[in-house]
Amino acid sequence: MALCPFCQSSTRKCHEDKRRAYFSCPTCFAIHVPATYHLTADSEKAEYNKHENHAEDAGYRQFLSRFSEPLCERIPSPSVGLDFGCGPGPVLALMLEDKGHTMSLYDVFYHPNQAALQQDYDFITATEVVEHLSNPVNVLDGLWGMLRPGGVLGVMTKRVIDTQAFKTWHYKNDPTHIVFFHERTLSFIAERWGCEMELVGSDVVFFNKPRCLP
């Protein structure tokens, strides 16, 4: 029996291809790949090394601007932020620094700076990283704990529509993508934290930390 990595509900197989099986959660609608199909750390990094995302790439900067522009509307300038899962070329951090913000970097493979995870931040970004997490709740809870009252945690990941559409969804074909968020999954997280959630477009969500705890 495979348990949902978010709400620990029992899940059922919703799809299988030639490489792996996928299980959906009837409670929070997340879809995940069981651990037996996860890549080794070396294989996972080898996949990331194929990515070519550079600061000079206007198309990539335009892609990230769909996240950075609404984020900057929600945070004062200057603010102090963490780019979690920044990859080898922290383009988003550079874009936010250009807006006057101070950025720290963390990436388990390329910037394994544990000191960055021991600080507090006005905002935290997690773009195209949460779908790679084998234990997403623990990681996200940790990021939420680093966020100052009134801060913003921004996540960028494509969302599941339903299990039927999932079967032909290109996003599932990346072997490093092991967990997939539905809108209800994000609502589950917001309820867990007791916070407001804002959906922006099809792949951006902001979790706003209350200024005062109830």
Image (cartoon, rainbow, N blue to C red):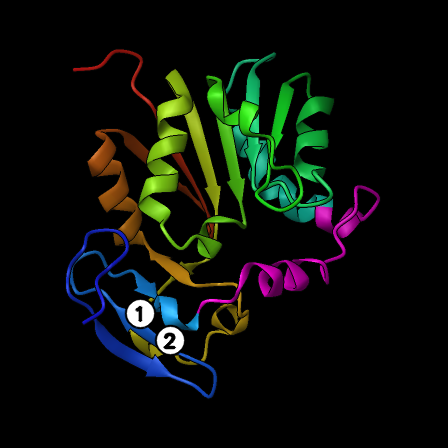
Q: Is residue 176 left or right of residue 13?
A: right
Residue 180 figure quarter = bottom left
153 relative to 55 in the view: left or right: left
Q: Is residue 54 left or right of residue 63?
A: right
Kindly identify which numbered label has been placed on residue 145. none
Task: Look at 62% across and 46% down and name the residue there.
Answer: 109
Residue displayed at 28% across by 52% down: 185
State the residue position of label 1: 162
Specify few, some or many for label 1: CA neighbours under 10 Å numbering under 14, 14-19, or 20 or more: few
Assign the C terminus to one quadrant of the image: top left
Residue reaching furthest right? Answer: 56
Residue 69 position within the rendered picture, expressed as x and y whole percent measured from the top left: 59, 33
Which region is colored magenta?
A: 38-60
Is residue 123 covered in magenta?
no
Please tell me whether mark 1 sits on a helix, a strand or a loop.
loop
Is residue 21 in view?
Answer: yes
- Quadrant position of residue 1: bottom left
Q: Which mark is residue 165?
A: 2
Where is residue 78? Give x, y as percent: 61, 12
Q: Are marks 1 and 2 in contact (CB under 8 Å)?
A: yes
